[in-house]
Image (tube, rainbow, N blue to C red):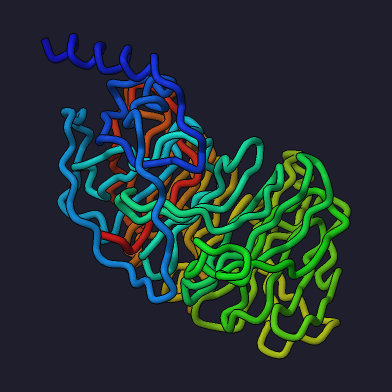
């Protein structure tokens, strides 16, 4: 009887018209293991209410607990696996919320082809790009429980990439182009007042790039500089308009990757493409520069040669999480030592720190089916790797660990 009811629900949802992306709303909580992606994308209310807008004095509140309406397939919950909440994009069309002990998992936003999911440093909101009006893409924010969704940008462009939060969680920077392959501009917009975009939230263009590709975007700690990696890394002062178009040159092996700024120090870390003569692999070698008094030429300090793909700081700035195509390393910035905690992953691991930096979440193949990606948690020391999902299908991308509970 339970399966008959579920099939009826799916068939009913499939007969309805998919709402426009401007009307993306949270659905009733859905079992990721029981409903295929195509069905989940239409399992929303037939007449969703209009989106609310962020008033000038809006302050986020803690979301109310939501109880799932479908039985979850149990993974292997851990007794304690960090605070906060994990989020990821499921199958490229939904945003999922996951308790870090594996006890709870549900879809909170369905539809709109979300991408670039990232959590505000204070845990109040999620940001991502999604389908806007017509063929346009825009930047959206959502509350951690998905009950609130609001468009932040209002460009009406075909491509919007790399939304990134300022450290005070008030402003988003992003790249956009009018066409799907055109040159990219860099933009900023405040979250508060986004219901009256562009004037209400001060949406503005910071710079226009000649490049049509971007491999990363980062704010400085003080919020006055934007660092954009489009081959070389350029720096743009959002306060006084100063620009250094090619601050950090790329190598002949490829573009600079993954610029990330320390949350506690005037330090920018990035990956400079390098070539491995032994294996033929191309990946990033860690480099850092000081950003407190930025005046070119800057001194680039070389770090570990890990042939990495991404890097990310812990919230306290002490640890750096570095991922290669199949490995995860934790580097202690205080001692300079590096420790491999994941090796031979079946997928690019997408590692993220827990808010307290005691745990790392990452993606790997399931123990029973190596070709189906699952979320794992592991101690920062490499101990106790544990799967916390048991998906029967689907993809996982843009894994992020928010301070939201």
Observer-nearest residue: 371 or 278?
371
**Residue drawn 77% across the image and 59% down it:** 185
Classify 284 as above or below 362.
Answer: below
Classify 69 as above or below 157.
Answer: above
Classify 307 as above or below 402.
Answer: above
Observer-nearest residue: 110 or 209?
110
Picture coordinates of residue 136, whole percent (x, y): 65, 42
Q: Which quadrant of the structure image shows residue 290?
A: bottom right
How many marks do you count on the picture? 0
Q: Which quadrant of the structure image shows residue 369?
A: top left
**Residue drawn 39% across the image and 76% down it:** 57
Extreme left residue here? Answer: 1
**Residue drawn 54% across the image and 57% down it:** 322
Observer-nearest residue: 197 or 306?
197
Would residue 286 be visible to someone looking at this image?
no
Quadrant occupied by the C terminus = bottom left
Picture coordinates of residue 81, whole percent (x, y): 24, 54
Is residue 349 shown left or right of residue 307? left
**Residue drawn 88% across the image and 56% down it:** 210
Extreme bottom residue here? Answer: 293
Quadrant occupied by the N terminus = top left
Would residue 240 be visible to someone looking at this image?
yes
Picture coordinates of residue 295, whole percent (x, y): 80, 87
Is residue 108 shown left or right of residue 218? left
Observer-nearest residue: 211 or 254?
211
Picture coordinates of residue 358, whole percent (x, y): 32, 63
């Amino acid at each position: 009887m339970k399966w008959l009811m579920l099939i009826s629900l799916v068939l009913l949802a499939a007969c309805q018209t998919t709402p426009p992306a401007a009307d993306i709303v949270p659905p009733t909580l859905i079992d990721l293991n029981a409903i295929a992606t195509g069905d989940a994308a239409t399992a929303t209310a037939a007449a969703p209410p209009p989106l609310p807008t962020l008033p000038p004095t809006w302050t986020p509140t803690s979301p109310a607990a939501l109880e799932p309406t479908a039985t979850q397939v149990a993974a292997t919950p851990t007794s304690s696996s960090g605070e906060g909440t994990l989020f990821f994009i499921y199958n490229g069309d939904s945003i999922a919320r996951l308790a870090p002990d594996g006890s709870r998992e549900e879809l909170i936003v369905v539809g709109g082809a979300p991408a670039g999911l990232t959590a505000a440093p204070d845990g109040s909101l999620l940001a991502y790009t999604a389908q806007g009006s017509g063929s346009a893409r825009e930047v959206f924010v959502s509350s951690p429980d998905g009950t609130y969704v609001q468009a932040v940008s209002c460009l009406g462009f075909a491509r919007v990439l790399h939304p990134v939060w300022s450290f005070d969680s008030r402003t988003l920077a992003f790249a956009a182009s009018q066409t799907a392959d055109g040159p990219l501009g860099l933009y900023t917009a405040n979250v508060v007042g986004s219901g009256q975009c562009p004037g209400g939230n001060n949406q503005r263009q910071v710079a226009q790039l000649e490049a049509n590709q971007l491999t990363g975007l980062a704010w400085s700690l003080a919020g006055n500089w934007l660092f954009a990696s489009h081959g070389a890394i350029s720096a743009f002062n959002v306060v006084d308009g100063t620009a250094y178009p090619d601050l950090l040159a790329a190598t002949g092996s490829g573009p600079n990757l993954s610029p990330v700024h320390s949350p506690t120090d005037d330090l920018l870390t990035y990956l400079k493409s390098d070539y491995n003569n032994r294996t033929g692999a191309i990946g990033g070698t860690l480099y850092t520069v000081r950003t407190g008094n930025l005046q070119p030429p800057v001194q680039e300090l070389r770090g570990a040669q890990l042939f990495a793909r991404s890097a990310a700081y812990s919230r306290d700035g002490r640890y750096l999480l570095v991922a290669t195509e199949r490995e995860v390393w934790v580097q202690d910035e205080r001692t300079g030592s590096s420790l491999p905690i994941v090796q031979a992953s079946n997928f690019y691991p997408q590692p993220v720190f827990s808010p307290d930096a005691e745990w790392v979440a990452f993606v790997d193949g399931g123990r029973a089916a190596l070709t189906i990606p699952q979320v794992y948690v592991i101690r920062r020391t490499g101990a106790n790797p544990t799967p916390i999902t048991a998906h029967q299908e689907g993809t996982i991308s843009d894994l992020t660990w928010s301070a939201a509970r």
